[in-house]
């Protein structure tokens, strides 16, 4: 239907399709002639922001429209019928087969100022904040021209009277975004010609004067620049290439390329290059770092291959090689299954050669380390749980390893492991089962203790006389019993026999079954009395036999294989109460800073009887005359030891104290006093053995601890006080020290530790997040401390050690930081020994570490300590880091000690170009 009004024709197209795809089509500003009408019908142009709107009538319906001249227009079942005041065209337009439109999808476009169609040029003009959308293609620009004769769209910038350009085009197709100066796009071929484009792909910013887009998957660029810098107007560095083939989300292939730093070309150039692009993990080569070692020559370190095994696991194989023949191998794997479990595994092996063959200091050694960490999501299976924390290997691994990643662990004295599985069977009573394998290794003595495995099973408390409903009351109703079983296979070996058949020669196995029976009740309302007995049965599969060999003139101990068992029992009772005391300091009419001090005392008295089990002891001759005898138990070398031979009847005394103060809150709006902990605990304990012939009192043990300064400083102390004196041979005698012209107690040992963690975040609402620090995690995985007091594990070439920090610091000035982040860790330890009149400080040290950001891009750190006893500094590490925007520079220096060394690194931050780096290091000198 066509409406002629004031020499203008408005065209409405109606379609025979019962479910038309389009509801409104408007064309305006066409002059009156039928050729123009037919021309207009050959285009499908959709304008959503025109001033005229009319629903399309269905076939066979009549629509009455009145114009300003009251002309009636009627539309029948023809596709389009034109009625005007002058002429009625009865030509059936639908008898001619229409040409297929060149646009196969809906075109939407808008403009802020105007939208104009030029019939002569067959172009549609959109001006100011123009936008056009066709399928997955979207263009936003200052000016957009849609050319119907060529099926092309052109987008460009706006230029004001001052010659300043604005509203640069933004071309988006799928997930690819290009910001050029201008662009030409063809709807038919989907090819595009882009001028001065800027786009980002997988961290790469690509700038090119001319870009030719062949299709959705291939783009060619000429004389392009690509960089990871965020400053595209003046990047710190970029790579300039004569030609580039770019496949979005897959790869970038470049021709001759030269590196430019600060707009200065460098000698760094390559004839061609390949850069993979992907949002998913992919396998690839890891470029090693190059350096020189004083003892092993030049080396390549931490190079290898990364395997993207699946979405749930990966594998990294790394290697080190030294020109003197030394080498190292590392395998690291991470795995995770969401809502089920996650973990990581690592194996490290190093073959180290010192000096040269033929020299007296030549040596060759191998060290290794195996680590495994596994954790299960608590919600995956509440009744069943599996966990693992493994750290085992050569005792000297961390001390002899020369890989920088082990820096923070070389002071470790112990390595430990645990792998456990537990299962809970709900019900009444509840049954818990667990199987555990443990490992403990002393790196100084090279002694290794293992349990392979340990089985534990226990049944929850059973109250046989408890009522079915209501609470339990009285001594009878509170009677309860339990059952627990523990089976172990213990192995004690050394580092040299580890993982060899000989390590199982001294293995000991046994089963311990325990049935405790107890009850508790109130006494005189304020006292809690508990009493019980404990029955134990020990099964063992290997015992010993001792006898005197006249030929060898010595006592022979031999193993006896076979099942054997012994049974023990004991009795115990305890009485305790809690006493509260309050000391008020606030007086009437006076406002005191300290309101009150509360003292909580928990005294306890216990009594234990341990019978003597002489039936498990035997006598044997220890000399050739047969006149001297000695006693032994065949179970004394069993896994749980021998039963008690001496009867004991002891009374235990203990007192636990807690001191807390109420002080006036500095916040004037607070309505309640503030609670301050004075002493978290102060405990005293001793015992008196009625059955002993002498030395009936055991030493008095005192321990305590508290937290101050907003719980940032932890203070713990302890002491041992002996009431008995020493003889001339420094042995305890049955004489009270006060009767030997001494004090009431003799101080035999004392210790105190103080730890303090302080940071600028202590005075703000932010919280520390050190547990997420990769270097701290590396320390913990290696059995080290959860801080940097022993230094930081470092691999400067590994980007995960230096994650970008988010926060307010990025808003600071480039030269001045309004808030200076800093951290300070202190650890003080003092130990005193006087058990044999040595009266000495056995150890006295202060360890400290700190980090501070001097400016938004400069940070320094240090880890050190001082030994007050030996008058010298402990292991010291100095660190410096410079943020160079797209680059990062690090320097680590150990100025003295046997591990004197330094390490310098500079490289690009972006993970895609992390192999472009330079590092130099000085390894520790060889210790003869």
Image (spheres, helix red, strand yellow):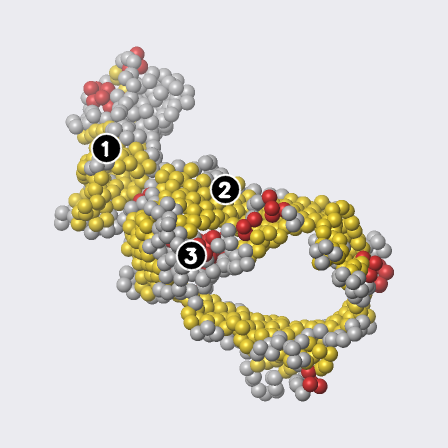
Between discs 2 and 3, the one toward the N terminus: 2
Q: Are marks 2 and 1 in contact (CB under 8 Å)?
A: no
Residue at left offset 23%, top offset 43%: 239
Task: Determine which residue is flagged by label 2.
Answer: 335
- From the top left corner, tell me how far across and down residue 16 is, in percent: 37, 18
Q: Nearer the viewer, mark 2 or mark 3?
A: 3
Q: Is residue 903 above or below residue 688?
A: above
Tell which residue pokes out farthest to the left in this image. Answer: 162
440 shown above or below 4: below
The percent position of residue 591, horizontal first and vertical second, equals 56, 84
For the residues marked 2 and 1, what is the alpha-carbon distance in whole angstroms? Answer: 39 Å
Task: Name the residue: 31% across, 40% down.
Answer: 201
| Marks 2,3: beta carbons within 8 A | no
Q: Alpha carbon of mark 2 to alpha carbon of mark 3: how far?
A: 25 Å
Q: Residues within 10 Å of mark 1 (few under 14, many from 20)?
A: some
Which of the 4 quarters of the picture holds residue 852?
A: bottom left
Percent position of residue 573, x then y:
79, 67
Q: Earlier in the sequence, mark 1 or mark 3?
A: 1
Which residue bears the numbered disc 1?
Answer: 220
> Is any atom of residue 177 visible in this view?
yes
The residue where tag 3 is placed is: 407
The circle on residue 180 is none
Tell me the SS state at disc 3: helix
Question: Closer to the camera: disc 2 or disc 1?
Answer: 2
Secondary structure of residue under mark 2? strand
């Amino acid at each position: 239907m066509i409406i002629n009004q004031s020499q203008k024709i408005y065209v409405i197209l109606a379609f025979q399709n019962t479910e038309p795809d389009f509801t409104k089509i408007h064309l305006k500003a066409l002059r009156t002639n039928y050729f123009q009408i037919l021309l207009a019908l050959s285009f499908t142009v959709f304008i959503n922001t025109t001033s005229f709107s009319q629903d399309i009538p269905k076939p066979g319906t009549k629509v009455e429209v009145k114009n300003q001249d009251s002309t009636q227009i009627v539309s029948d079942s023809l596709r389009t019928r034109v009625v005007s005041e002058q002429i009625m065209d009865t030509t059936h337009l639908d008898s001619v087969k229409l040409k297929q439109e060149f646009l196969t999808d809906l075109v939407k476009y808008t403009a802020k100022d105007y939208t104009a169609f030029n019939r002569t040029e067959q172009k549609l003009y959109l001006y100011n904040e123009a936008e056009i959308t066709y399928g997955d293609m979207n263009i936003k620009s200052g000016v957009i021209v849609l050319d119907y004769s060529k099926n092309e769209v052109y987008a460009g910038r706006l230029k004001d009277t001052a010659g300043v350009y604005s509203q640069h085009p933004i071309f988006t197709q799928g997930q690819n975004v290009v910001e050029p100066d201008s662009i030409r796009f063809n709807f038919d071929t989907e090819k595009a010609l882009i001028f001065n484009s800027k786009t980002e792909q997988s961290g790469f910013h690509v700038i090119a004067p001319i870009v030719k887009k062949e299709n959705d998957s291939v783009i060619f660029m000429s004389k392009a620049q690509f960089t990871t810098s965020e400053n595209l107007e003046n990047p710190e560095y970029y790579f300039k290439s004569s030609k580039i083939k770019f496949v979005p989300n897959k790869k970038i292939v470049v021709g001759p390329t030269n590196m430019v730093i600060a707009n200065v070309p460098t000698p760094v150039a390559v004839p061609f290059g390949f850069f993979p692009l992907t949002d998913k993990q992919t396998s690839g080569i890891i470029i090693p770092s190059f350096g020189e070692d004083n003892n092993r020559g030049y080396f390549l370190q931490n190079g290898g291959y990364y395997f993207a095994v699946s979405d749930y696991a990966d594998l990294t194989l790394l290697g080190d090689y030294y020109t003197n023949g030394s080498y190292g191998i590392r395998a690291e794997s991470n795995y995770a299954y969401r809502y089920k479990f996650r973990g990581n595994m690592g194996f490290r092996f190093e073959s180290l050669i010192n000096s040269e063959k033929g020299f007296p200091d030549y040596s060759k050694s191998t060290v290794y380390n195996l680590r495994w960490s596994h954790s299960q999501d608590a919600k995956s299976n509440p009744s069943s749980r599996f966990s693992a924390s493994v750290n085992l290997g050569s005792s000297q691994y961390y001390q002899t390893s020369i890989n920088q990643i082990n820096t923070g662990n070389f002071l470790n004295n112990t390595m430990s492991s645990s792998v456990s599985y537990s299962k809970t069977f709900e019900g009444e009573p509840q049954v818990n089962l667990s199987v555990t394998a443990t490992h403990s290794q002393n790196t100084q003595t090279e002694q290794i203790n293992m349990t392979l495995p340990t089985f534990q099973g226990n049944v929850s408390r059973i109250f046989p006389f408890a009522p079915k409903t209501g609470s339990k009351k009285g001594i009878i109703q509170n009677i309860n019993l339990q059952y627990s079983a523990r089976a172990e296979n213990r192995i004690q070996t050394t580092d040299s026999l580890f993982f060899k058949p000989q390590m199982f020669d001294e293995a000991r196995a046994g089963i311990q079954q325990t049935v405790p029976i107890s009850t508790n009740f109130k006494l005189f309302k304020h006292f809690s009395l508990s009493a019980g007995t404990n029955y134990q049965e020990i099964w063992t599969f290997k015992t010993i036999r001792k006898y005197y060999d006249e030929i060898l003139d010595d006592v022979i101990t031999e193993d006896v294989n076979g099942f054997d068992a012994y049974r023990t029992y004991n009795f115990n009772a305890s009485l305790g109460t809690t006493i509260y005391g309050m000391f008020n300091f606030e007086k009437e009419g006076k406002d005191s800073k300290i309101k009150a001090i509360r003292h909580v005392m928990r005294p306890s008295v216990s009594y234990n009887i341990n019978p003597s089990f002489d039936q498990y002891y035997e006598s044997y001759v220890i000399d050739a005359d047969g006149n001297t005898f000695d006693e032994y138990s065949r179970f004394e070398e069993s896994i749980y030891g021998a039963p008690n031979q001496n009867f004991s009847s002891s009374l235990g005394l203990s007192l636990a104290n807690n001191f807390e103060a109420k002080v006036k809150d500095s916040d004037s709006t607070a309505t309640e006093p503030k609670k301050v902990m004075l002493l978290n605990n102060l405990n005293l304990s001793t015992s008196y053995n009625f059955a002993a012939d002498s030395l009936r009192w055991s030493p008095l043990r005192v321990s305590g601890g508290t937290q101050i300064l907003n719980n940032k400083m932890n203070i713990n102390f302890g002491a041992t006080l002996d009431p008995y004196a020493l003889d001339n041979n420094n042995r305890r005698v049955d004489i009270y020290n006060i009767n030997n012209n001494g004090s009431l107690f003799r101080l035999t040992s004392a210790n105190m530790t103080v730890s303090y963690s302080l940071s600028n975040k202590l005075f703000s609402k932010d919280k520390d997040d050190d547990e997420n620090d990769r270097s701290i995690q590396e320390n913990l995985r290696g059995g080290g401390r959860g801080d940097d007091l022993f230094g930081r594990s470092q691999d400067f070439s590994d980007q995960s050690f230096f994650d970008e920090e988010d926060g307010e610091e990025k808003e600071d000035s480039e030269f001045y930081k309004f808030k200076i982040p800093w951290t300070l860790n202190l650890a003080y330890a003092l130990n005193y020994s006087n058990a044999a009149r040595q009266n000495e400080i056995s150890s006295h040290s202060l360890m400290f570490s700190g980090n501070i950001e001097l400016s938004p891009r400069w940070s320094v750190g240090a880890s050190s300590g001082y030994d007050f006893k030996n008058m010298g500094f402990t292991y010291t590490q100095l660190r410096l880091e410079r943020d160079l925007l797209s680059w990062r520079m690090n320097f680590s220096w150990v100025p003295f000690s046997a591990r004197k060394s330094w390490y310098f690194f500079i490289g690009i931050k972006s993970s895609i170009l992390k192999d472009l780096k330079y590092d130099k290091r000085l390894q520790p000198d060889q210790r003869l």
